[in-house]
Image (spheres, rainbow, N blue to C red):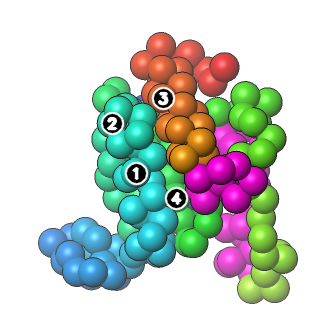
């Protein structure tokens, strides 16, 4: 496993709910699909707009984009969480997403929220997958550019630029 994936995999990892062969509309490889199907489709569309710069996969029931060398470059979750492996300074402020819900009072949920916050303080940025602040087609192109840049960084084996 590439050490660059450790923190993101620790965030994405959840317990499997069924056998690894289980695949249904709401279970992928035995993991509950914890991402809205519309967001799964959006992640696929972003990758297609980026010229299929990465491989679309499900990791622990969440859609992810993985560079050819195995480095995770983007992932989605829930309804509106989409993160790209680029530092915030490299992302148009109109695309940066924010946590929409307050911190949970449930310890496990709060821990996951804080884990994501820590992840996006460094080499990852949470972006708005629906690009509300940018016209629809321009937003898709901008997100695709971010994914392509993240793939380039992964291929260069350098930290994010």
Near-viewer residue (45 or 20): 45
- N-terminal of the pair, mark 2 or mark 4, is 2
Q: Which residue is mark 3?
A: 148
Q: CA distance from mark 3 to mark 2?
A: 9 Å
Which picture quadrant has residue 146? top right
Q: Is residue 142 above or below residue 13?
A: above
Q: Quadrant of the N terminus?
A: top left
Q: Is residue 110 above or below residue 68?
A: below
**Which segment is the magenta one?**
107-136
Q: Are marks 2 and 4 in contact (CB under 8 Å)?
A: no
Would residue 1 be visible to someone looking at this image? no
Which residue, given by chain and number where applicable, does mark 2 sit on?
A: 52
Q: CA distance from mark 1 to mark 4?
A: 13 Å
Give 99 or 10, whichever is nearer the viewer. Answer: 99
Q: Nearer the viewer, mark 1 or mark 3?
A: 1
What is the secondary structure assignment of the residue under circle 4?
A: strand
Residue that badge 4 annotates: 76
Location of residue 27 with respect to 12 vertically, above or below: below
Tag 1 near tag 4, CB within 8 Å: no
Please rate how many residues cluster around mark 2, counting C-alpha atoms within 10 Å: few if below 14, some from 14 to 19, many from 20.
some
């Amino acid at each position: 496993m590439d050490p660059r994936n450790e923190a993101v995999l620790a965030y994405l990892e959840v317990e499997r709910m069924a056998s690894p062969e289980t695949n249904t509309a709401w279970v992928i490889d035995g993991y509950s699909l914890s991402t809205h199907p519309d967001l799964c489709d959006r992640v696929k569309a972003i990758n297609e707009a980026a010229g299929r710069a990465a491989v679309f996969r499900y990791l622990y029931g969440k859609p992810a984009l993985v560079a050819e060398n195995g480095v995770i470059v983007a992932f989605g979750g829930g309804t509106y969480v989409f993160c790209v492996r680029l530092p915030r300074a490299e992302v148009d402020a109109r695309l940066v997403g924010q946590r929409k819900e307050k911190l949970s009072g449930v310890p496990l949920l709060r821990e996951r929220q804080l884990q994501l916050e820590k992840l996006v303080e460094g080499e990852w940025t949470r972006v708005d997958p629906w690009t509300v602040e940018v016209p629809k087609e321009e937003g898709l192109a901008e997100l695709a550019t971010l994914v392509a840049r993240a793939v380039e960084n992964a291929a260069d084996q350098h930290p994010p630029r």
